[in-house]
Amino acid sequence: MKTELNTLLVTLYVHLDDRILPALGFTRDHRPGRKPALNDVELLCLLVAQHLLGIASDRKWIRYARAHLRGMFPNLPAQSGWGKRVRQATGLLSAVITELARDTPTFGEVTRLVDSTPVPCGKSRETVKRSDLAGHAGYGYCASHSRFFWGFRLYLICTPEGMPIIWGLANPKIGEREVTEQLLRHDRHLIAPGQVIVGDKGFAGRQFETFVTEELGAHLIRPDRKDEHKRFGKLGGIRQWVESVFDTLKGQLTLEEHGGRTVAGVYSRVAARLLALAAGIWHNWLTGAPSKRSLIAYDH
């Protein structure tokens, strides 16, 4: 394992244990009953390590961790216990992502990027019929790859370098504007007045733009449609930023190989990958790395 990943895990462990988890009300003894062998800070650091290393399979990850990380994390659970802890930690993961975002300089900057990407959950008709995700997931179309998929869409509102600010999963049959509006309503405290939200043509609509402008006090910028007057142009260069964020999530962080089979499983596994991305960007800011979203230093 490279020194860079080791340094990130040690720094993140101290930061979580000393500041973030106490501020969120999570202490080592916050649960009733018997104290778990693996505490929350260790769980979060192990999840970050798993996904920065690109190990999608929990079975392979537990085997790898027992071989290489027992010195740092001696109380590793079995695969079933690991999966149960991860599924129970979705709320904690989301809260920690937000706190890491607050600790980066770009959290207070004006620009936010918004887009969605497919999160496939099954590739066969038999899987669709038998899956516990039936009734939650659905069929959708990915224009970028010219393919249909069955699963969810991940909606992400992030900073220009890719730090997740607001995120959520939704059935692909629900419109982009409707989902994004609900996410912004729920987490409107994370959008400051005057911020600029950059989206694609799918966010064109008077009602959505009015919501962003009048209720949030922000500004929506998107590429011009062919049937309207010129306002913002094509915005191809800016739009490429969020596409590169999704490329990182799907490439190094194995988003499409999440393996979730229940709603809680999919949410927690997506959240774990977003946490790994957030931790990498946070540490790159801390160490002054030239490329804040580059995770190459942590993938061995």
Image: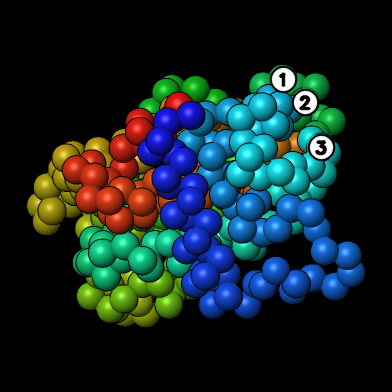
Identify residue type, mark 2.
Answer: Thr
Q: Is residue 140 above or below residue 37?
A: above
Q: Position of residue 100 (x, y in %)?
A: 43, 62
Residue 294: which quarter of the image? top left
Q: Residue at x 73, y 53 (%)?
A: 38
Q: Which of pointers 2 and 3 indicates the residue nearer the eye?
A: 3
Which residue in the protein does label 2 denote? 127
Instruction: Give the farthest residue toward the front.
Output: 71
As measured in the structure, the alpha-carbon distance from the residue carrying label 2 to the one carrying label 1 is: 5 Å
Res 71 → quadrant: top right
Q: Residue at x 30, y 56 (%)?
A: 286
Which residue is depicted at the point 54% across and 26% down?
148
Residue indicated by mark 3: 78
Look at mark 1 in the image and give the residue it sits on.
124
- N-terminal of the two: label 2 or label 3? 3
Q: Compute the Cα span from label 2 to label 3.
A: 26 Å
Q: Amino acid at mark 1?
A: Ser
Residue type, numbered disc 3 = Ala
Instruction: Determine if residue 81 is in view.
Output: yes
Secondary structure under badge 2?
helix
Seen from the viewer's position, the closer of residues 143 and 17 is: 17
Foreground pick, 153 / 252: 252
**Residue 125 horizontal side relative to residue 292, left or right:** right
Q: Are marks 2 and 1 in contact (CB under 8 Å)?
A: yes
User: In percent of the image, x 18 and y 39: which residue is there?
Assistant: 236
C-alpha separation, residue under disc 3 versus residue under disc 1:
30 Å
Crowding near pointer 2: few (<14 within 10 Å), some, many (20+)?
Answer: some
Q: Residues within 10 Å of mark 1 (few under 14, many from 20)?
A: few
